[in-house]
Amino acid sequence: MKRVLNRSLIAGVLMFSTAGATVYLTPTQRLVAKEDALVLEDLVPKQFGDWKMDPNAIAVVPSEDTRELVAKIYDQTLNRTYVNSQGERIMLSIAYGGSQTRQLRAHRQEVCYTAQGFQISSLQQTTFEINHAAIRGTRMVAAQGNVRIEPVTYWFTMGNTVVQNYLDRQVAQLKYALSGVIPDGYLYRVSSISLDASEAFKKQDAFSSELLAHVDPKLATRLLGNVGK
């Protein structure tokens, strides 16, 4: 109980500190200039190891509201499905937002999936190893009845930091506000269709580790945050 109260107190202090910093120190400089932004389509390989992009994959079309929200938050989005020689498929989504302000902060995937009609279960914030880096991210299982069971792994970065929860985002926002900088950020998400969530998460971690070993090093560092340096 005491620990929960302490976390609430810290979050409250950070909230008011961030609000104050926003009033007196309005960020004007972007962390990464638009012309320096990394082009996802060019830097993420379509084939690596035993995986290759499946050109025949049918994408799930998001609702109009979701498309509008994504357009406001992100400057770039990359959505692909990869298949290996065993016929296993993993869906990849990477999105980049050049201005991660209070209004346009990256949205949580459980909210996005729920808006698409999925039921969310086994939602947990946890730490997993990706390409030798300890990533603090989120796992969940999204389901549309018994037709589609989709274990999902995702994480966010804000600036050079992986942010897992509200407190993380407040700390990062305050740090950049005090520096007069508007942070950018990434969403990294992988998912697959599977009835065995535990096994699916293992395969997703292995896929992500291999992928991030093959992408451009600059992009890998941004996706892994400081832990990837």
Image: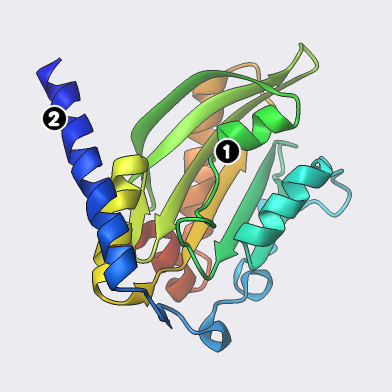
Q: Residue at x 65, y 16 (%)?
A: 195
Q: Residue at x 62, y 62 (%)?
A: 74
Q: Looking at the picture, how far across and down is residue 102, in whole percent? A: 45, 56
Judging depth in this view, the residue of 217 and 40 nearest the camera is 40
**Sequence-earlier tag: 1 or 2:** 2
Disc nearest the viewer among 1 and 2 = 2
Judging depth in this view, the residue of 190 and 54 nearest the camera is 190
State left or right for residue 204 relative to residue 25.
right
- Badge number at residue 6: 2
Q: Under tag 2, what secondary structure?
A: helix
Q: In this view, which residue lies farthest toward the left?
A: 2
Which image quarter holds the C terminus? bottom left
- Badge number at residue 109: 1
Which image quarter holds the N terminus? top left
State left or right for residue 226 relative to residue 209.
left
Q: Name which residue type carries label 2.
A: Asn
Q: Looking at the picture, how far across and down is residue 35, in whole percent? A: 57, 88
State left or right for residue 147 relative to residue 129.
right
Asked if residue 227 can be seen in this view, the reply is: no
